């Protein structure tokens, strides 16, 4: 079955500390994975996609096919990173399968 | 310079009274999506259009319909809203089925 799992509903870290938001997937083909972010009272927006191999707002995510993971990382958290983060997988019908989301809170 | 615009931002409707939510885009994207998002949950795809081709998700209730009269506009019609339909409704577009999505700000629907 195709599935995206974000094991943490809530993650709270101090400003300046490293952040890792976990995402694991189950997919039989070659996955295309995304991270979306939703800041408070703002629209859901694309943060990054694995195919681009880019760093956005200091965040990176590496696809690990052996561990079927696509964890989102940032070495030094900032208060403005507080938001809801969703990991998503594009399936064979080109539809997004969403994880349940992780709420990230950065404490001052 | 909002590129996917949803109106209204907040909509209150009576139980059973038909309601229409609208979405417009200035991106000229081929694909448009309607999602339902309930509190603390991931978005749930209701349907999408690839150009004029309509694709309904198998578990989307018949109560929900959609229209896309042209590339720029897409509407979500809820024929008889129930209390369980109260949610945030998100419109999204994509240049192709392979692209990342651009979301609108959403319409929060309240059913009274």
Image (cartoon, rainbow, N blue to C red):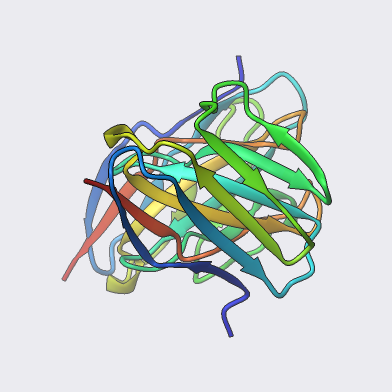
Residue A79's quadrant in the figure? bottom left
Camera-side residue: A76 or A94? Answer: A94
Q: Work out which residue is located at the far top of the displayed protein and give it.
A: A1
Tell me if I can see residue A46 in this picture. no
Q: In the rendered view, does A4 fall on the left or right side of A76? A: right
Residue at 35 percent across and 67 percent down: it is A81
Which residue is at the front of the view, B65 or B47? B65
At horizontal 68% and vertical 49% (from top left) the residue drawn is B67
Would residue B99 appear left or right of B45 to someone viewing this image? right
Q: Nearer the viewer, residue B105 or A87?
A: B105
Near-viewer residue (B33 or A84): B33
Q: Measured along the vertical axis of the image, is residue B24 above or below residue A90?
A: below
Residue at x 60%, y 58% (from the top left corner)? A48
Which x, y percent locates residue A56?
Answer: 56, 68
User: Residue A58 appears at what percent x and percent y?
Assistant: 50, 69
**Residue B71 visible in the shown view:** yes
Identify the image quadrant of the N terminus of chain B. bottom right
Q: Residue furthest left?
A: A108
Query: Residue B43's spot in the image, x, y percent?
Result: 47, 42
Residue occupying the far bottom of the picture: B1
> What percent of the width, then of the height, locates residue B92?
61, 56
Report the number of numbered marks.
0
Instruction: From this view, report whether residue B110 is shown above or below residue A82.
Output: above
Left or right: B21 in relation to A20:
right
Residue A32 is left or right of residue A79, and the answer is right
């Amino acid at each position: 079955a195709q599935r995206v799992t974000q094991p943490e509903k809530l993650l709270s870290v101090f400003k300046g500390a490293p952040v890792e938001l976990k995402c694991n997937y189950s997919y039989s083909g070659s996955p295309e994975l995304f991270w979306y972010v939703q800041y408070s009272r703002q629209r859901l927006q694309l943060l990054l996609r694995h195919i681009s191999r880019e760093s956005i707002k200091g965040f990176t995510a590496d696809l690990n096919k052996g561990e079927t993971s696509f964890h989102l990382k940032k070495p030094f958290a900032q208060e403005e990173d507080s938001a809801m983060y969703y990991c998503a997988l594009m399936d064979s019908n080109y539809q997004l399968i969403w994880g349940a989301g992780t709420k990230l809170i950065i404490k001052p | 310079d909002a590129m996917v615009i949803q109106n209204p931002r907040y909509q209150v409707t009576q139980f059973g009274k038909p309601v229409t939510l609208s979405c417009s885009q200035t991106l000229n994207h081929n694909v448009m999506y309607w999602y339902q998002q309930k509190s603390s949950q991931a978005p749930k795809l209701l349907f999408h259009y690839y150009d004029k081709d309509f694709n309904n998700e198998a578990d989307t209730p018949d109560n929900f319909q959609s229209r896309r009269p042209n590339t720029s506009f897409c509407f979500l019609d809820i024929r008889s809203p129930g209390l369980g339909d109260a949610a945030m409704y998100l419109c999204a577009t994509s240049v192709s089925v392979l692209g990342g999505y651009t979301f609108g700000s959403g319409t929060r629907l309240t059913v009274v």
